[in-house]
Image: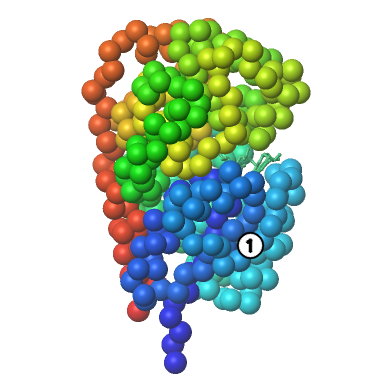
């Protein structure tokens, strides 16, 4: 008797959970795919993992690899070593990976070397900056994937240039935006309580996130950015949910405690609390990839503290602006946003409509359900 096709979903870090939840739900809904969820354990703090599972109504992982933190090589190797026996035992029909984190590449490599088809969700994005570990993860994951699911048209061009056969590439839209649109009502409902807890007036605050090694690992860059952020906090309150790696770097630089009441450092927030906060913000400053996309859909001005973005559609269609990480440029751009009227020019990129996961799972069905 033929067994039901089994797909193994591998997630590891915060942004993976947001991208995977709607795909897993859509794949399980049909009843014709047997889906297993593997959590590598790359993110393991409750605020970085469990809270996201709860907010996204994602079932507990079927398998937890508990790899934890480490250098890039250690973390990638740990996922590979622990995933290989799982794949050998289960022999799934396909392995689905998400985004660009170390767990993504580790799972894709392990599966491909066992001859298992890999599907990459959020394929083809390129910053063309190999100093970002994520860029290496993206390119290598794409190169061993059989099915490549793209969120935006630039990804299709990038993959074509890299010689990937067009029939393997599917522009389906953005599953992270499926999660956003699904959770927005509840996030808005929660916002007053979140704002009250942080001592904020609704609508009169900025949100900051910072975790890229290029911004937080160099003490001089971090100190200069800190100056620009303090300057902004003199104009309006800045909420800063601090990633654990940034917390450690701030502490090392003697910056861990805010001496300004308007600069509000807090622990990382859960998905819905953070989404509600983003939605109500006057301005967002970030070095995250996903937040550039979320602010685009929410129509909230976003200043990206990087020199490049792998998500150019957020510049052409959205509210995103690249400002780099020089303090003067960050301050000037923030001031400009605060002094201009909110713009209504942003448009939602094609297929960022809340149905990306359904389109994606249709392709998976065609490939795996015969
Ligand atoms: C990872 C991804 C990055 C993504 C980010 C989202 C890679 C290369 N980077 O970066 O692309 O934007 O997740 O948040 O995969 N830590 C904890 N608790 C946790 C997880 C991490 O304290 O639950 C601390 C550890 O000290 C760890 C450090 O944070 O060493 C960095 O974690 P890691 O998963 O290596 O990378 P991120 O910076 O989170």
From this viewpoint, is residue 11 visible?
Answer: yes
Residue at x 54% of width, y 62% of height: 60
Establish if 185 lies above or below 4.
above
Task: Identify the image quadrant of the C terminus.
Answer: bottom left
- Residue 326 image-quadrant placement: top right
Query: Seen in the image, is 76 located left or right of residue 39?
Result: right
In this view, 16 is above or below 361: above
On the question of residue 309 being in view, the answer is: no
Residue 151 percent across, percent down from the top left: 37, 45
Which residue is found at the position 53% from the left and 37% from the top?
269
Q: Give left or right: position of 300 versus 253.
A: left
Quick check: 119 above or below 32? above
* Residue wearing tag 1: 64
Up-down: is 128 above or below 338? below
Q: Is mark 1 within 8 Å of ligand 1?
A: no
Q: Nearer the viewer, residue 137 or 224?
A: 224
Q: Nearer the viewer, residue 262 or 102?
A: 262
Place of residue 171 in the rendered image (x, y in percent of width and height, measured from the top left)? 33, 50
């Amino acid at each position: 008797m033929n067994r039901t096709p089994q797909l193994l979903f591998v997630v590891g870090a915060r942004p993976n959970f947001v991208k995977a939840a709607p795909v897993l739900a859509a794949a399980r809904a049909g009843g014709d795919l047997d889906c297993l969820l593997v959590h590598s354990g790359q993110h393991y703090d409750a605020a970085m993992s469990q809270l996201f599972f709860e907010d996204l109504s994602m079932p507990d992982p079927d398998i937890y690899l508990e790899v934890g933190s480490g250098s890039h090589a250690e973390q990638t190797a740990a996922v590979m070593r622990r995933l290989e026996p799982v794949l050998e035992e289960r022999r799934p029909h396909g392995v689905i990976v998400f985004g660009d984190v170390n767990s993504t590449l580790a799972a894709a490599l392990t599966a491909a070397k066992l001859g298992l088809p890999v599907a990459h969700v959020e394929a083809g994005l390129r910053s063309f900056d190999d100093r970002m570990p994520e860029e290496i993860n993206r390119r290598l994951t794409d190169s061993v994937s059989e099915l490549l699911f793209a969120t935006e048209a630039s990804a299709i061009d990038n993959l074509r240039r890299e010689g990937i056969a067009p029939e393997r590439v599917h522009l389906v839209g953005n599953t992270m935006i499926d999660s956003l649109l699904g959770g927005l009502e509840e996030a808005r409902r929660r916002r007053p309580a979140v704002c009250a807890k942080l001592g904020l007036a609704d609508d009169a605050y900025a949100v900051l996130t910072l975790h890229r090694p290029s911004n937080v690992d160099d003490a001089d860059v971090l100190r200069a950015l800190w100056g620009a952020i303090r300057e902004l906090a003199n104009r309006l309150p800045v909420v800063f949910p601090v990633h654990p790696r940034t917390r450690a770097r701030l502490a090392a630089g003697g910056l861990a405690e805010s001496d300004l009441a308007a600069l509000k450092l807090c622990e990382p927030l859960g998905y819905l609390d953070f989404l509600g906060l983003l939605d109500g913000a006057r301005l967002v400053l970030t070095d995250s990839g996903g937040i550039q996309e979320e602010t685009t859909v929410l129509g909230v001005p976003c200043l990206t503290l990087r020199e490049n973005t792998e998500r150019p559609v957020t510049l052409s269609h959205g509210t995103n602006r690249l400002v780099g990480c020089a303090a003067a440029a960050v301050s000037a751009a923030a001031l400009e946003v605060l002094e201009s009227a909110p713009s209504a020019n942003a448009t939602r990129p094609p297929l960022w409509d809340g149905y990306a996961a359904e389109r994606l799972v249709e392709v998976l069905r065609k490939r795996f359900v015969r």
